[in-house]
Image: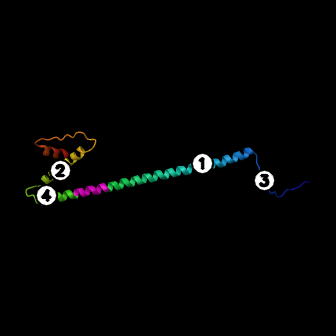
Amino acid sequence: YGYQIIQVLITDLDPDQRVKNAMNEINSSKRLKFAVAERAEGEKILKVKSAEAEAEAKYLSGVGVAKQRKAIVDGLRTSIVDFTDGIKGTTSKDTLDLLLLTQYFDCIKDVGSAPNCKTTFVPTSKSFSDEMRSSLL
C-alpha cells in the first residue's frame, strides 16, 4: 500500500524569503541585546573603578593631612620648649601668643598675596594681641 520513507538527506534548504528575514532579525536582535549588556557592564566597571580610585585618593589625602598636622604640632612643641628655655622669664603662654601672632601674620600675607585679592583689612589697636588671641581661641 504505498511507500514508507525512513530517512531523507536534505542538501539544500531554501526557505521562503520572509522566513529568512525573520531568522536574520532574530539573530541580529540577540547579538544587539548581548552587545548592549556588555557595553553596560563595561560602563559599570569603569564607574566602580573610578569611585574606588577617588575613595583611595581621598583616603591618602587625609593620611597626608594628618601627617602634616602632626609634623606641625611636633615642630610647634619643639619651638615652644626651645623658646621658653632659651629666653628666661617667658612662659608657655607668651610663647604660644607669639606663635599665634606669627601664624596670623603668615595667614594675612598669604591672603594678601593671592592673585584675586584686592584689599586686606588688618585691624590694630593697643590691645590687639589680647583681642586677637581671645578671638582666635
Q: Which residues are magenta?
A: 64-73
* Dot 1 alpha-carbon crowd within 10 angstroms: few under 14, some 14 to 19, many 20 or more: few
Kind of residue at badge 1:
Lys
Please give the label number shown on residue 33: 1
Contact, mark 2 vs mark 4 (Cβ under 8 Å): no
* Residue 36 painted magenta: no
Labels 1 and 3: the sequence-earlier one:
3
Please give the label number shown on residue 83: 4
- Does 14 sit left or right of 42 as displayed? right
Is disc 1 placed on a helix, strand or loop? helix
Labels 4 and 1: the sequence-earlier one:
1
Q: Quadrant of the N terminus?
A: bottom right
Seen at 11% across and 60% down, the residue is: 86
Q: Name the residue tied to disc 2.
A: 102
Contact, mark 4 vs mark 3 (Cβ under 8 Å): no
* Residue 39 image offset from top left, x and y in percent: 54, 50
Please give the label number shown on residue 12: 3
Contact, mark 3 vs mark 2 (Cβ under 8 Å): no
On the question of residue 9 being in view, the answer is yes
Seen at 12% across and 52% down, the residue is: 94
**Label 2 vs label 1, nearer the camera:** 2
* Dot 2 alpha-carbon crowd within 10 angstroms: few under 14, some 14 to 19, many 20 or more: few
* Residue 7 image offset from top left, x and y in percent: 82, 58
Contact, mark 4 vs mark 1 (Cβ under 8 Å): no
Q: CA distance from mark 1 to mark 3?
A: 31 Å
On the question of residue 137 being in view, the answer is no
Seen at 41% across and 54% down, the residue is: 53
Kind of residue at badge 4:
Phe
Labels 2 and 4: the sequence-earlier one:
4
Kind of residue at badge 2:
Thr
Kind of residue at badge 3:
Asp
